[in-house]
Amino acid sequence: MLKVSGVEKKFGNTEVLKGIDLNIDTGEILVIVGPSGGGKTTLLRCVNALEHCDNGSIEINGRAICKDGKYVDKKTMAEIRKDIGLVFQNFNLFPHMSVLENIIEAPQKVLGMSKKDAIKKAEEILGFLDLEDKKNNYPFELSGGQKQRVAIGRALALEPKIMCFDEPTSALDPGLTGEFANLIKKLSNNGMGMMIITHDMEFAKKVSDRIVSMSEGKLQKGLIFEE
Ligand SMILES: Nc1ncnc2c1ncn2[C@@H]1O[C@H](COP(=O)(O)OP(=O)(O)OP(=O)(O)O)[C@@H](O)[C@H]1O
Ligand SMILES: [Mg+2]
């Protein structure tokens, strides 16, 4: 599903990623923990092609976005990136659009879906996320957990094979964190692979199939620190 090998990244003279090897299987939930500044977000950004690595290879669902530090052309990249979804820490919802509008935007623009089909799909997703009654509300009218579910819904509308989350529970209370963990499990049971960065060890242990630690630009199996 996701194959990362030998990925290196420098910012100026600072080596932030020092040869990262990582695989995620179908439906597998991989959690990455580790001290601040270790390179977790940079790795996530490289995997989503928001940042270009200097060296190494990244394959998403069997197709390379980058091989030995060389990236595919824009059009191929756009095609491959449909298979990977990213939920940002601050959710990045469109503030002037309702919940429904937030979700139907990408399928129409990226997948070329008709508005009617996009709405049908969005309504299914809203049902799955238990948000039917919020579809006409605006982001400012939602709680943190509801906003997060809309952000997940927006990513799900593109039917990615793999989803990435950067510190998804930082705005959630313990109850909502538990609900979020259940949602992640439900999605992975449907075959979606997950890459989740978190500082929340309890959540990491609850949700993960596998935990790796990252520090100083390197990955280690298992835990090297506990907060
Ligand atoms: N755009 C950038 N330009 C220069 N340096 C950067 C840039 N982005 C990240 N860095 C540096 O790369 C290192 C790794 O940052 P990164 O955000 O990946 O860490 P992190 O593991 O996600 O930390 P945290 O747990 O605090 O979110 C840090 O030293 C950071 O200052
Ligand atoms: Mg980070």
Image (cartoon, rainbow, N blue to C red):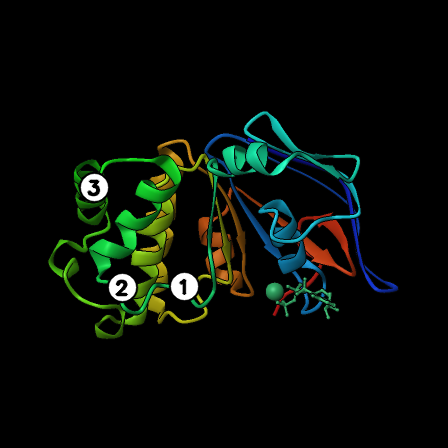
Q: CA distance from mark 3 to mark 1?
A: 23 Å
Regarding mark 1 in the picture, which secondary structure is present there?
loop
Q: Which residue is mark 3?
A: 115
Quick one: quadrant of the C terminus?
A: bottom right
Q: Amino acid at mark 2?
A: Gln
Q: Residue at x 32, y 70 (%)?
A: 144
Q: CA distance from mark 2 to mark 3?
A: 24 Å
Select label 2 or label 1 by which is in front: 1
Q: Quadrant of residue 5?
A: top right
Quick one: quadrant of the N terminus?
A: top right
Q: Ligand 1 is found in which quarter of the picture? A: bottom right
Q: Position of residue 93 (x, y in %)?
A: 35, 63
- State which tag comes first along the sequence, 2 or 1: 1
Q: Residue at x 45, y 69 (%)?
A: 170
Residue 182 in view of the camera: no
Front residue (pair 2, 12) = 12
Q: Which residue is mark 1?
A: 91
Q: Furthest residue to the bottom?
A: 140
Q: Dot 3 surroundings within 10 Å: few (below 14), some, or many (20 or more)?
A: few
Select label 3 or label 1 by which is in front: 3
User: Is 198 placed left or right of 130 in the picture?
Assistant: right
Q: Residue at x 36, y 43 (%)?
A: 109
Q: Which residue is mark 2?
A: 146
Q: Dot 1 surroundings within 10 Å: few (below 14), some, or many (20 or more)?
A: some
Q: Amino acid at mark 3?
A: Lys
Image vertical order of residue 187 relative to residue 169, above or below: above
Q: CA distance from mark 2 to mark 1?
A: 11 Å
Regarding mark 2 in the picture, which secondary structure is present there?
helix
